[in-house]
Image (cartoon, rainbow, N blue to C red):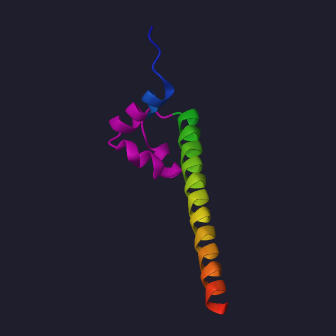
Amino acid sequence: MNKEKFEQRLFRIFAQAGYSPIRILTVTPEEMVEIPNITVANIRAVLCMQNKVLTEQNHIRAGQLLEEILQMESEDGKNEG
């Protein structure tokens, strides 16, 4: 028996429930519980994926904010000097 990859199975379960693949990043745990054939392992995997994406986005935002602060400081230094 050919074993389906975990990610492919997860996408298939969501597709059968009428969710687009990108929706996996925004679906709530309450909504996931209502999806037929979803397991606790699937829900945990989705939550981990959502957390990872959110963490990466926060790192990008934090980096952009730091860049903006440094740029403002350098502009203030030029204006004072």
Where is 53 relative to 7, above or below? below
Tell me, yes or no, whether the highlighted magenta stretch contains residue 23. Answer: yes
Q: Residue furthest bottom?
A: 80
Q: Which residues are magenta?
A: 11-38
The residue at 48%/45% (across/down) is 32
Picture residue at 49% right of the left edge, 44% below the top:
33
| Magenta stretch contains residue 68 | no
Task: Answer with the quarter of the image where residue 34 lies.
Answer: top left
Q: How many numbered discs sit on the rendered protein?
A: 0
Image x and y of residue 30, in percent: 50, 51
Asked if residue 31 can be seen in this view, the reply is: no
Which residue is the extreme one toward the front? 81
Q: Quadrant of residue 80?
A: bottom right
Residue 51: x, y in percent?
Answer: 59, 50
Placement of 33 over or under 56, stated as above or below? above
Which residue lies at the image location 44% right of the left edge and 28% below the top edge?
A: 9
Looking at this view, is 56 or 8 the one in front? 56
Q: Point out the image quarter for the N terminus.
A: top left
